[in-house]
Image: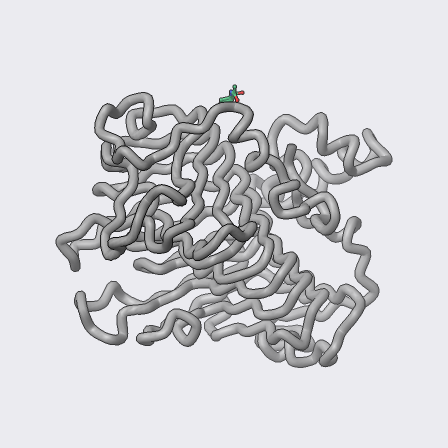
Amino acid sequence: MARLHLLLLPFLVATVAVLVSPFGRTLAKTAKKSDDIVNGPLLTSKINAKRTLIVGPEDEFKTVQAAIDAVPVGNAEWVIVHLRSGIYREKVVIPETKPFIFMRGNGKGRTSITHESTSSHNAESAAFAVHANNVIVFGISFRNSARAGLPNTPEIRAVSTMVSGDKVAFYHCAFYSPHHTLFDDIGRHYYESCYIQGNIDFIFGGGQSIFQCPEIFVKPDRRTEIKGSITAQDRKEEDGSGFVFIKGKVYGVGQVYLGRANEAYSRVIFADTYLSKTINPAGWTNYGYNGPTDHMVLGEYNCTGPGAADASSERVPWARKFTKEEADKFITVDFINGKEWLPAFYY
Ligand SMILES: *[C@@H]1O[C@H](CO)[C@@H](O)[C@H](O)[C@H]1NC(C)=O
């Protein structure tokens, strides 16, 4: 009975939402919690695809990759690839030639893609990779089930998900790996209510991304002496890239830095976020980087909790503490031109 309620709830919420407001955007403005606005049925109605490919043990497609393979090269109309509840043990790649895929699961607790692979290359190790533009993903867990390996071995990378298409959004997804979890490589991306777990540099790359209401869990990793970092953003010049975290929470076991400055223009902002004591008082590190720190944009705005800048007098001198005016241009979907392409978003 309880299970039935759980399954029905998102549909009821969506039904009420649609009845209350004929305009999705109007509704979005008044929603209090992201759960009120962004769910599978709402995204489905917004995306309005003509074709649905169903993946499941009793369905036409037995593997996720078989369904992706069935999408035509040069696809120009939205196609739903629906994954029934269950664990899919495979590597999944959406190639550059197959845009406009809406990959929909039944919720991050019910549908998952699991694959074990390690490599010396991040891209090769990825359990799930999106190379196409215009991809929307809802309600799926992505897990690279590799064990944390030995330090300093070449087979060190174990990426859960790699995102290198433009205009890619994940809603209510989860990403698991021992470290190097989410390779946010390049392009404009949006992550809404996602769970991300890892240790060393576990959200990394040169993406231009908003993480709305993320839950970030730091796992202990005893392989190295150094402390890990949640982020390692690769901005090399004054381009639009950067990672913006809004209204999330960060907690876990052991200590990490908010980010590692690994390029001269690295840009990461944590705003309105709860930071537990798992954040080292220094906040940021430039471990492995010897260049100047004056062009880096690494800092916080209005964060709370024992790990926030307000609770520490030991932040590195180059950490920024943004004013409201500075923060305002990051804490909006305009940072990724979201109003032009996101089917739904949280204000
Ligand atoms: C600061 O963050 C809290 C959430 O932690 C939010 O409710 C509040 O509106 C924020 N204040 C400002 C001035 O942005």
Instruction: Give x and y (percent) for residue 169.
Output: 61, 53
Res. 254 in view: yes
Q: Quadrant of the C terminus?
A: top right
Instruction: Give x and y (percent) for residue 52.
Output: 75, 67
Which residue appears at 31% of the width and 75% of the height? 120
| Residue 205 versus residue 333 in the image, above or below | below
Instruction: Give x and y (percent) for residue 293.
Output: 32, 44
Which residue appears at 57% of the width and 44% of the height? 192
Res. 106 in view: no
Between 216 and 284, which is closer to the camera in this rendering? Answer: 284
Instruction: From the viewer's perspective, tell me whether residue 140 is left or right of residue 153.
Output: right
Q: Report the number of numbered marks.
A: 0
Between 83 and 175, which is closer to the camera in this rendering? Answer: 175
Between 99 and 316, which is closer to the camera in this rendering? Answer: 316
Which residue appears at 60% of the width and 75% of the height? 95
Instruction: From the viewer's perspective, tell me whether residue 336 is left or right of residue 112.
Output: right
Instruction: From the viewer's perspective, tell me whether residue 16 is left or right of residue 268.
Output: right
